[in-house]
Structure formats: C-alpha cells, structure tokens
Image: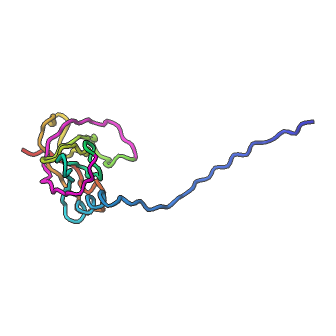
Amino acid sequence: MRQKTEILISHQELQVPFNYSAGPIAGKFLLALRDQQKILAIRCPKCKTVYLPPRATCGKCFSELSEWVELKGTGKIQSFTVVNYKEPIHPQTKGKLIVAVIKLDAADTGLTHLIGEASEKDLKVGAKVAPVFREYRQGNILDIKYFKPVK
C-alpha cells in the first residue's frame, strides 16, 4: 500500500546585505552631484558626442571616453509623462509624478528625471528647465531633487 506524502511549505525571508559600486565613471558623476552640485558629462575624443549620464564607451564609434565636461544644468524638455498613481518605489509621495527626458545644454543625449514646481498644463516639449539640488545629498541621481521650469 502506498503512503500519502504531505507537502510542507515554509515561509522564509532572506536578507542579503551587499555593497554596490557605481564604478569610476558613474562614481565621479555622482560625487560631483553630491559634493559640488555640479553636473558632469563625458565627451568622445573621436566623434565629440557628449553623453549624460556619462558612460565608459561611445555608443557611436566605440571609443573609450575620458574627457569630462561640466554642464551648466539648464536644458530643454524633449518629452514628458505624468504618472497618476502611487507606488512605494516612487521618489515622491505628494502630487502627480512628472517624469521628463531632458537634454541639457551642450549634451547630445537626454537625462530622465523628475519635474517639480510645475503642473502638467504648464509644461510643453522644448520648455527650458534648471536643476534644483537637495539640501542634504547622498551621492545618487536624486541629489538633483527635480528640474523646474525657467524662462
């Protein structure tokens, strides 16, 4: 005669602490945001494309990138969207979340970030924006609290 087998299910939660290294390129970018409130991009020595956020290799000609460029911080909205729902991972809890792709002056690529001090009806593609830095910065992209419209 065959014996019945009971399936035992046990709930466990694992915590795996770890350290994450941003690496030398992103690390320099994030430290400049945190310590100097500066936005650094990186320029290709061969094709002159300016990347923001910075990266190690040119996406056009595959050259190694090492020429740092400080940007003013002002730029224009290339596109944006409004998020009308809340999630625990969202970086802000009040109001609608407006996310934009922003092409900073002198950069050739767009940076995705938050828009603040504006409502969706005040925004349009091509609107000029400038960064607002957090008072207490921690070395991540949210050291720029958001970009706000400027004239």
User: Residue 28: x and y, percent?
Assistant: 27, 61
Q: Name the residue furthest left.
A: 151
Q: Residue 82 at what x, y percent from top left?
A: 27, 36
Whether 60 is among the magenta residues is no
Q: Is residue 15 rendered to the left or right of residue 136?
A: right
Residue 95 placement: quadrant: top left
Looking at the picture, how far across and down is residue 103, in whole percent? 18, 43
| Total residue callouts | 0
In this rendering, the answer to whether 118 lies above or below 121 is below
The residue depicted at 89 percent of the width and 36 percent of the height is 2
**Residue 73 in the image, given as x and y percentages of width and height:** 15, 52
Give the extent of the magenta segment.
62-88
**Going 84% across and 39% down the picture, which residue do you hit?**
4
In the rendered view, how is the structure colored? rainbow
Membership of 63 in magenta stretch: yes
Residue occupying the far bottom of the picture:
35
In the rendered image, which quarter contains the N terminus?
Answer: top right
Residue in front for this viewpoint, 32 or 16: 32
Q: Nearer the viewer, residue 13 or 19?
A: 19
Please report the residue visible at 23 percent of the width from the left and 66 percent of the height from the top: 35
Q: Quadrant of the C terminus?
A: top left
